Amino acid sequence: MDTEILKKDVVIIGSGPAGLTAAIYSARANLNPLVVDAPANTAKQTTPGGQLMITTEVENYPGFAEGIQGPELMEEFRKQALRFGTEFLETWITEVDLSERPFKLYTLIIASGASAKWLGIPGEAKVPDGFGGNGVSACATCDGPLPAFRNKVLVVVGGGDTAMEEATFLTRYAAKVYVVHRRDKLRASKIMQEKAFHNEKIEFVWNSGVEEILGTPEDGVTGVRLSNLQTGEERTFPCAGVFVAIGHKPNTELFKGQLDMDEVGYLLTSGQSTATNIPGVFACGDVQDSVYRQAITAAGTGCMSAIDAERFLDHLPVAMPSGDEVTVDGEHITPDHQAIITADGHMISNKS
Ligand code: NDP
């Protein structure tokens, strides 16, 4: 097999809001970034441009007073990145070796995002194969305020914090929200459970699973087929929308064993910067954020990654998760800022 060697200062994996913001900033800093994005693949649920490509109206991205369609917004991001000379490569990355510095590339910005988990049931797929984008969503913040869901009966699937948060959020608009959970106990934290239990617009459907999402192309979702997982009994439950909230999966398989991550797989970053445990590798967007997961926060951390990468390539120190600051030359500055340990292990004072 032919191998092509590409020499790049900055490689960005991922082309959602985080990756493309990192690209815009690093391209404007003359770092000639290369953005590697995953090809579209229905089975793997990947789309160049990330999760906004499967969203309809985006009403909360600042700068678009009238709202903008998700794919249109990502097209604008991409054009802006191209305008400053970003290069794109659409390919699957099958392996990443970060053990050898400078790992053939100098800095790596990981913006590979997270994917919502889906139930895998009939009716859930994106339009035209199902009702995804026409009544089925995995993001209440993104889609809940849309007119189609106002004063309607909605179903949220899941029993974790996300499901409680989504259900609570949706009660601002919906007439009623039914949380369908496969057990009779929630996984969500106590405080989130209590909020949901005390909300009179929320009701729980325990020990139940959604087997199918029903509807028509004209009206969108009209109901779900529910099954009681204890008795096997099935019934049709009318509703105008289904929010699947059974968790997200950060796209970090490639980095297992190389980069530090939490138990779910989210990459751990410094907090003071977007640095991971390997100098020169930065992470931004949903791949390192299990809490906010918004396009605007992804774009914000994408900008931070580009500035971190820029500093690093300028031989300036960048804060690591360990508390040390490191430079591209392999120097470590201790967390108390008192000493510099050089690449060959000598300690010198950092006092001016
Ligand atoms: P979780 O993994 O915590 O919960 C997923 C829920 O979905 C569980 O109740 C699970 O059921 C259910 N589920 C999973 N797969 C299926 C399936 N195939 N069919 C039906 N039900 C299914 O994910 P969350 O996204 O809720 O939370 C992820 C992390 O993010 C957590 O650490 C959470 O605390 C945090 N978070 C915090 C928030 C906050 O504090 N504001 C808000 C949102 C998330 P079961 O319980 O039976 O396994």
Image: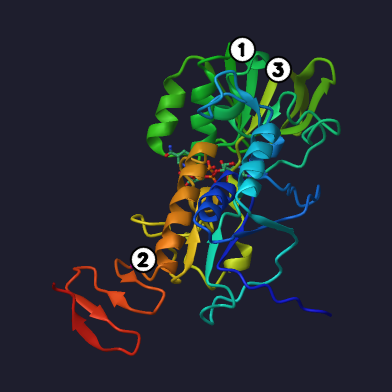
Residue beneath disc 1: 150
Q: Which mark is residue 240?
A: 3
Report, in whole angstroms, how far the alpha carbon at label 1 lies from the one at label 3.
9 Å
Q: Residue at position x 78%, y 19% from top?
A: 220
Q: Are marks 1 and 3 in contact (CB under 8 Å)?
A: no
CA–CA distance in space, label 1 to label 2? 45 Å
* Boundaries of the magenta span: 316-321
What's under tag 2, amino acid-wise? Met
Is the residue 225 above or below the residue 108 in the image? above
Q: How is the image coloured?
A: rainbow
Q: Residue at x 19, y 68 (%)?
A: 336
Q: Is residue 235 rendered to the left or right of residue 344?
A: right
* Comparing labels 3 and 2, the label whose residue is closer to the camera: 2
Sequence-first disc among 1 and 2? 1
Q: Is residue 248 left or right of residue 224?
A: left
Q: Which of the 4 quarters of the picture holds residue 152?
A: top right
Q: Earlier in the sequence, mark 3 or mark 2?
A: 3
Q: Can I make out residue 185 in this image? A: no
Numbered label attached to residue 320: 2
Q: Secondary structure at mark 2?
A: loop
Residue 98 x/y as whole percent: 55, 75
